[in-house]
Amino acid sequence: MYKYIFGPVPSRRLGMSLGLDMVPHKVCSLNCVYCECGRTTNLTIERKEYVPYDGVISELDDFMKNNPAPDFITFSGSGEPTLNSRIGDIINYIKLNYANIPVAVLTNGTLFSDKEVRKDLLKADVILPSLDAASSLSFTKINRPFHSINIDDYIKGVIDFSNEFKGRIWLEVFVIPGINDNNADLDLLKNIIKKINPEVIQLNTLDRPGVVDDIRAATKIELQSIVDYWALPNVEIIAAVAKRKDVKSFRKDIESAILETIFRRPCTLEDMAEILGLHINEINKYLDTLEADGKIEVVRQERGLFYQVKNK
C-alpha cells in the first residue's frame, strides 16, 4: 500500500486520475463547511515539506513501473497541496520523467497571493482552483479561513495567477443555498470570474452531509438558475455522481469492499480508510456514487458521520 499516492480514482473531469497527497490528513488553510474529508484539524498557511519529496517520488516511480499510465497525475488529497513547499519540485520531476502525462492541481487558491506558490505551479497543465464567494462575509461563513487570509488578497492572487499561467484553469464554485446564491453575491462572483477568465466555471454542491448541520445541497433547478443569471458562455454544472460508474477507472471490487465493510457495522470515512487500506479521497468517490444509487445512507453521530447500508 502506498502512503503518498492513491488511486487511480474515477473522475469525470480527469478520467483515470492518480492522486498525490502532499499533506497529512486535513492540513489546510480553510475549514470549509462542506468538505467531504471532514473538519480541518491543522488550520494553517505555513508552507513546509509536510510529506517527503523522496517518498513521493519513490512511490510514483514504483507505480509508473508496474501499472498502466493514468490519464492525469493529480495533486489533491485530504488537505491543501500548495502548503507543501516541494510541490514545484515534484511537478518538475513529473514533467521531466513522465512528460506525456498531464498534471492537474486541485487547490483552494488561497496561497496564490504568494508569488513562490504561483511559480511552483506554472509547469502544471490544468489548475482547478475554487472560489466560492467574493464577499468577505460569505467567504468567512463558507470557507472559515485561517485568520490572516482576507478575501481581497485571495482574489488578487487567483487573478495574478491566471495572468501568469499558460495552461488551463477550471474554476470551481461550490454553491450553498442561503449563503452565496443571492444576487449580490452572484454579481460579485461574476465580476471576479470575468477577471480570472477561466476556461470553464464548474458549479458544484453537496453530494453528502457537510461538516455542519445547517446547510443543504442546491437543487438542479437552483444551479441552473445561477447558470442562467450569469449568462456566461462557459459555465457547467458538475454531472451527477452516478455517472462516475461510466468512467473507465471505476472499480466494482472497491465498491463491493466498501459495501461489505459497512454491512457489518456503520463506519466513518476514516474507519473505512484504515480497514480497506485506501485513501480517503478514493473512498469518497465511491461513497458519492453508492449514496446516489440508494445503496447506503449517512447518519450523524457524536463521533461524526457514519455510513451504513440502506435497508439491509
Image: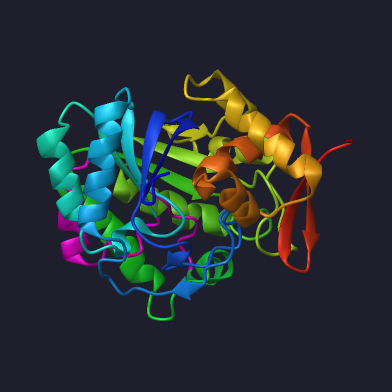
Q: Position of residue 141 (x, y in %)?
A: 58, 69
Q: Is residue 6 left or right of residue 138?
A: left
The quadrant of the image that shows the N terminus is top left
Residue 298 located within the stretch drawn in magenta: no
- The vertical placement of 166 against 21, above or below, is above
Residue 205, horizontal then vertical, whole percent = 61, 46
> Farthest residue toward the bottom?
147
Q: Residue at x 50, y 66 (%)?
A: 139
Q: Which of these two is toward me, 40 or 56?
A: 56
Q: Is residue 299 left or right of residue 112?
A: right
Which residue is depicted at the point 51% across and 46% down? 281
Is 128 left, or right, of 85 in this rendering?
right
Magenta highlight on residue 115 = yes
Residue 101 x/y as whole percent: 23, 29
Q: Nearer the viewer, residue 269 or 147?
A: 269
Q: Which residues are magenta?
A: 108-135
> In which image quadrant can residue 160 be found?
bottom left
